[in-house]
């Protein structure tokens, strides 16, 4: 795709082409379309979010974080970007920052699965395992529109159920590495 061809495409076209490329496993094309989209004056929060997700998918986590941060700066109500950004921060062992990002999700309606996912991850940050499991389970039960997100939350729940509650038994560096793998694994096989 040439620069002159990209210049002819509008935001909606760039985003749809990026989604098509991403679904086909063509991250290079998806990123090219999205980089064009976010470089424009009419860049949208969704374009930044999608670019962040692509970067995270190819394990360029800091770039993913930067784009997710740009997305919520443009649209603080873009709740899915908040959730994904928090997962990236948790994967970087930055629980305090993840908590700040998650807090607005707790203000969503109780019928919104992201409300429960936000609460669940906040409980997890505070090492409140049973509360985290309950809230994440409620979110999964309510979420009928994003099966991949349910898969991510179920992976976290399985991890919580399998790992002993006494984390002190494991060396801290091993626990941090395992936690990073858990939260970042959302980007290693499933596209959102």
Image: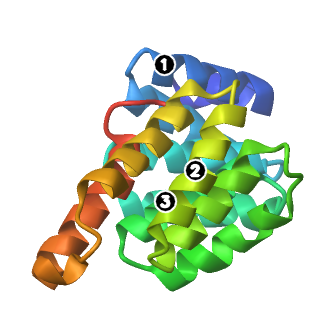
Q: Residue at x 84, y 58 (%)?
A: 77
Whichever of labels 1 and 3 marks the residue nearer the N terminus, that label is: 1
The x, y position of residue 154, in whole percent, is: 45, 40
The x, y position of residue 20, in whole percent, is: 55, 16
Q: CA distance from mark 1 to mark 3?
A: 21 Å
Q: CA distance from mark 2 to mark 3?
A: 13 Å
Whichever of labels 2 and 1 marks the residue nearer the N terminus, that label is: 1
Q: Quadrant of residue 155?
A: top left
Q: Secondary structure at mark 1?
A: helix
Comparing 165 with 35, the one in front is 165
Residue 177's label in the rendered image is none
Dot 1 corresponds to which residue?
A: 23
Say whether marks 2 and 3 touch (CB < 8 Å): no
Vertical position of residue 124 compared to residue 95: above or below: above
Dot 2 corresponds to which residue?
A: 136
How would you rate the neighbour count of disc 1 (Cα within 10 Å): few for under 14, some for 14-19, many for 20 or more?
some
Indicate which label's residue lies in the foreground, 2 or 3: 2
Say whether marks 2 and 1 touch (CB < 8 Å): no
The x, y position of residue 7, in whole percent, is: 69, 31
């Amino acid at each position: 795709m040439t620069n002159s061809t990209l210049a002819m495409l509008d935001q909606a076209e760039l985003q749809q082409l990026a989604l098509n490329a991403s679904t086909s496993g063509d991250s290079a094309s998806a990123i090219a379309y999205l980089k064009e989209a976010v470089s424009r004056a009419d860049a949208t929060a969704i374009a930044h979010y999608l670019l962040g997700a692509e970067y995270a998918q190819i394990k360029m986590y800091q770039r993913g974080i930067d784009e997710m941060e740009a997305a919520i700066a443009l649209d603080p109500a873009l709740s899915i970007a908040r959730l994904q950004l928090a997962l990236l921060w948790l994967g970087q062992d930055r629980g305090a920052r993840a908590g700040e990002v998650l807090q607005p999700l707790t203000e969503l309606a109780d019928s919104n699965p992201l409300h429960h996912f936000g609460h669940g991850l906040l409980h997890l940050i505070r090492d409140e395992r049973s509360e985290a499991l309950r809230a994440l389970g409620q979110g999964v039960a309510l979420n009928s529109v994003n099966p991949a997100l349910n898969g991510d939350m179920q992976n976290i729940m399985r991890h919580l159920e399998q790992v002993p509650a006494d984390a002190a038994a494991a060396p801290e560096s091993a626990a941090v590495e395992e936690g990073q793998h858990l939260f970042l694994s959302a980007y290693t096989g499933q596209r959102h």
